[in-house]
Image (tube, helix red, strand yellow):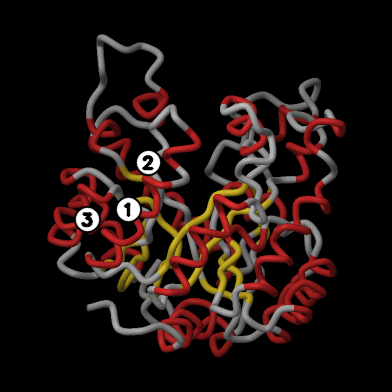
Amino acid sequence: MGPPTVPIIDAHTHINGLEASRLFAEVMDLYGVEAVWSMTAIDEVEAVRTALEGRFEPIAVPDFRNPDRRRAHGEDYLRRIEAYREQGARIVKFWAAPRIIEFGEEAGDPALLRLDAPIRREGMQLAVDLGMAIMVHVADPDTWFATRYSDRARFGDKRSHYEPLEAALSNFQVPFIAAHMGGWPEDLEFLDGLLERHQNLHLDTSATKWMIRELSRHEPADLLAFLRRHRGRLLFGSDIVTLDEHLRADPLDAENVMSAKASNEADAFDLYASRYWALRRLWESDHDGESPIADPDLALVDPDTFGPMDAPRLRGMSIPEEDLASLYREAAIGFSKLLPPAE
């Protein structure tokens, strides 16, 4: 595709695995990605930093593998946040997708992991005390609320998931990033209101399949106007996940979800590169055609029309260079200046 208008800072990735990180570094070079902010496992931070030659900043995340949800997102996470800060992290992630209700149910309290719950407020206060920013994942695609979360008595409606977020934004006056276009790329008007009410809030544009599907449905003029109204508060993100499991098949685990995404180096390269190809096409070009990335959400909401390997329309927005410069790079630099040095 050639180099982007400016070198890209990807503010939302999940880079893990030494071998996968080295492969991902090649993808970064090819698509003009200068640096990534990444939710990397604490024990892999230094290895990934080395593999990416320092073009990397960690974001603190809990241990999602721990089945004790209360402990993993509570006292253990407090210790991890401090350990991440020592490793240069300046952002703490609090995952609050509707599935936190299921996590809470496992621990005997459906409200355990709400963003306004005591266990979350304690973690956010620690982030504030350490001078760190806060990243949140709130809500999920409209397609999921129409299907997976259709039990309103259990999951509520989509708007209800923003009430704890708005409380946190008001109570903790530090910079926030709401991932995945704030969790509602389908509704720019709602996001306008959210950003106007909370000047400490920023959004990232991560979750490639979701963004391609939903942002392509907006009129380019409307999306450009949104970018300009909130210039400097929208950061580029991809949500790329890398793992060494992508590089080899596991004959002992036919159900391995990660190996299903890629099971050799060539497929892993395509998996990572396809996200940057699609996102740059979305933002930079006038491309209008099928996305190269299968999107199972189409079949989730309309199984009679779509299969799990079908893909949505990818409609290029042809965003002007000065606006791309803000989205790709300047907004991330501006956000970084709000935070203390990494070291």
Q: Which mark is on residue 146?
A: none
Position of 88 compared to 300: left or right? left
Q: Is residue 119 above or below residue 169?
A: above
Which residue is tagged 3? Answer: 45
Could you say which quadrant of the image residue 249 lies in? Answer: top left
Residue 131: horizontal and vertical position, in percent?
41, 78
Q: How far is mark 1 from mark 3, CA to CA? A: 12 Å
Q: Which mark is on residue 63?
A: 2
Query: Are dots 3 and 2 in contact, CB under 8 Å?
Result: no
Depth check, front residue: 88 or 244: 88
Could you say which quadrant of the image residue 164 lies in? Answer: bottom right
Q: Residue at coordinates 31% horizontally, 62% vertically from top-left?
A: 82
Q: Which amino acid, by three-letter code, is at mark 1?
A: Arg
Q: How far is mark 1 from mark 2, CA to CA? A: 9 Å
Q: Earlier in the sequence, mark 1 or mark 3?
A: 3
Query: Are dots 1 and 2 in contact, CB under 8 Å?
Result: yes
Q: Residue at coordinates 63% horizontally, 36% vertically from top-left?
A: 99
